[in-house]
Amino acid sequence: MSSTTARSRPSSNSRKPRLLLIGAGHAHLHLLHQRPLLSRFDITLVDPGAFWYSGLASGVLAGDHSPSTDRIDPAAICHAQGVSLVRARLCGLNTEARQALLSNGASLSFDRLGLNLGSAPALRSSDHQASGDKQTHWQIKPIPHLLRLRHSLERRFRRRQSVSVEILGAGASGVEIACAIEALGRRHQLAAGALTICLRHRGSGPLPEAPARARRYLLAALERRGILVVDSRHDRHCSASDIVDATGLGPPRGLERFGLPVVDGRGIAIDPSLKVQGTDGVFASGDCAALIDHPLPRLGVHGVRQGPVLAHNLIASLDPKAPLTSYRPPARALSIVNLGHGEALALYGNAWWGGRLASRLKHHLDLSFMQRTRNLL
């Protein structure tokens, strides 16, 4: 090990600086196969469960993919890379004392801290049937909620019960969920009229930011699938057996309790280096973080692209003279909406195309990402 590295250590003994990673999201999974980073730090990952990839979530709901295809256990990766894993959640944080309090009662010290806490539904709603309520409410995150929705629907499909589903929100997530449920119903060969799906929007229609011709293509696809598109401004009546909240995602609730600066409604305040504003050695990435001067949509592409920036800056933070690099969000990013039945709608800025080629591309990109992540084992 070089003398420069030795001088950068925070204490006079031979121990490596302690890097504590909270959350097994895109950016932190990237860190786990960075050999220079692994050699510089003593790393502990804190996460309560498995990593679920949102790109495959609608395919799991439709029955196209098994849950195991969409899930990676970080324990196996950590074991292969010599990283410690603690199954817990973050409950408290003292950045001055460099201590993190976990849900299992443990307190872990750190020299560098990474926060990759994901997102949560923007609105609170129950994911179980309330007493006396004829409607069951579902949220789209965490992703296992969609798996429970699939199992609930399949039980009723096998009993040949009529089901009506209302999806609140007609963005990409709402469209994918509506199409996935329709595909699941067709997989079970339901009789005509046994499944009703209603996709609600607030006056701007499905995928309001997509090019006009792409939206017309989408509306035709929804009509072919028998999915009703309803404007909530004119029709507020709701008689569905199941309500799915796809109105949007926000940062995890309760971030303020960690004593970190927060941009209201967006997440932990970070600068372009991904460092939390006003802290030393604390970084945040992915959906829980908010670039102060550059609001970002909650897309997985940002977490993926922030991974290399985070790895570089964690190493650079060990040398006071080393400059930190900046995350530069792409001006546009490819988004592919899964419409089921081997059809998808691809959007890239003002360009778009729909059909089987878009579906094949999505399938390739999603499975390739999961395979690259699993190759860490």
Image (cartoon, helix red, strand yellow):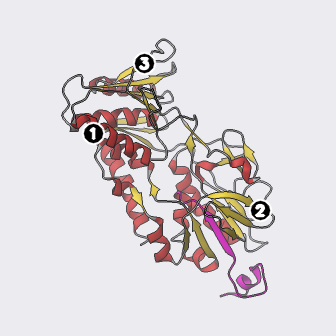
Q: x and y percent of residue 267 in the render?
A: 67, 45
Q: Nearer the viewer, mark 1 or mark 2?
A: 1
Q: Which residue is drawn at 31% across and 37% down?
A: 153
Q: Is residue 108 above or below residue 227?
A: below
Q: Which of marks 1 and 3 is in front?
A: 1
The quadrant where residue 322 appears: bottom right
| Labelled pair 2, 3 in contact (Cβ < 8 Å) | no
Q: Name the residue under label 3.
A: 230
Q: Farthest residue in the front direction? A: 131
Amino acid at dot 2: Thr
- Boundaries of the magenta span: 1-25
* Tag of residue 95: 2
Decide if residue 119 is in sight here: yes
Position of 361 with respect to 169 (left or right) is left
Q: Nearer the viewer, mark 2 or mark 3?
A: 2
Q: How far apart are marks 1 and 2 (CA)?
A: 48 Å
Q: Does the magenta stretch include residue 87?
A: no
Q: Name the residue under label 1.
A: 155
The secondary element bearing badge 2 is classed as loop
Q: x and y percent of residue 140 in the render?
A: 46, 40
